[in-house]
Image (cartoon, grey):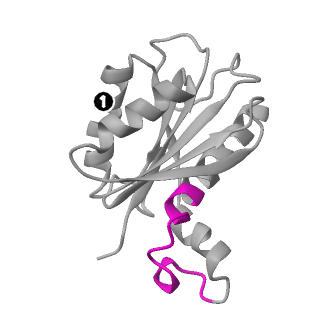
């Protein structure tokens, strides 16, 4: 079974209660946290203080305590807005993991009292795996590399940050 993952991105100092997939036009010069949601691991990434460049941060094991661990990191980093990866198939339809993502989005929004947005992402784990095994180009070449999920989160976060610049 193929591993599925998605992300969420968090940022600071943005009006609460906003939902949607478009970045806020007032969201400039803020620190962000990206989260790559997966059924086994949840990768985390952070941006620089200006919200320009994303860096891998850490990985949280998926399970009953993962949501609280992510919330704790969001609070520790002073995040103010979240963006979660939206998982779709090639036809643009929701795939199996999207139901879990929707629940995670709802729960993390309620626990943090922060707005939550979707960010589309495709093959971020495979792209991240190329950093560690470029000759293979897939996660299977090094599936347990501890920075893989955090690197995937950084790719998703960077995608979101780049959209903010447009």
User: Looking at the picture, how far across and down is residue 139, in whole percent?
Assistant: 50, 77
Quadrant of res 61? bottom left
> Is residue 9 depicted above or below 131 in this figure?
above
Q: Residue at x 68, y 21 (%)?
A: 27
User: Looking at the picture, how far across and down is residue 39, in whole percent?
Assistant: 31, 58
Q: Residue at x 67, y 82 (%)?
A: 134
Quadrant where the N terminus is found in the figure: bottom left
Q: Is residue 102 visible?
A: no
Q: Residue at x 27, y 58 (%)?
A: 96
Q: Secondary structure at mark 1?
A: helix
Quadrant of res 33? top right
Mark 1 nearby-residue class (10 Å; few <14, some 14–19, many ≥20): few
Residue ID for mark 1: 106
Looking at this view, name the residue that lies furthest to the left: 64
Membership of 65 in magenta stretch: no
> Is residue 79 depicted above or below 70 in this figure?
above
> Is residue 49 depicted above or below 62 in this figure?
above
Quadrant where the C terminus is found in the figure: top right
> Is residue 90 depicted above or below 2 in this figure?
above
Residue range in magenta is 136-151
Badge count? 1
Report whether 45 appears left or right of 107: right
User: Looking at the picture, how far across and down is residue 35, in whole percent?
Assistant: 49, 45
Q: Residue at x 31, y 21 (%)?
A: 110
């Amino acid at each position: 079974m193929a591993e599925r993952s998605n992300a969420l991105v968090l940022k600071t100092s943005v009006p609460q209660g906003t939902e949607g997939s478009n970045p806020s036009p007032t969201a400039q010069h803020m620190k962000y946290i990206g989260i790559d949601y997966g059924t086994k691991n949840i990768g985390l990434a952070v941006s620089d203080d200006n919200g320009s460049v994303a860096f891998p941060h850490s990985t949280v094991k998926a399970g009953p305590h993962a949501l609280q661990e992510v919330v704790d990191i969001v609070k520790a980093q002073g995040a103010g807005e979240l963006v979660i990866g939206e998982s779709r198939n090639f036809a643009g339809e929701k795939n199996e993991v999207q139901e879990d993502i929707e629940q995670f989005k709802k729960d993390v929004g309620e626990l943090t009292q922060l707005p939550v947005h979707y960010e589309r992402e495709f093959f971020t784990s495979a792209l991240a795996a190329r950093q560690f095994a470029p000759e293979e180009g897939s996660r299977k070449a090094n599936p347990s590399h501890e920075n893989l999920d955090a690197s995937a989160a950084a790719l998703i976060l960077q995608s979101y940050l780049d959209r903010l610049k447009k």
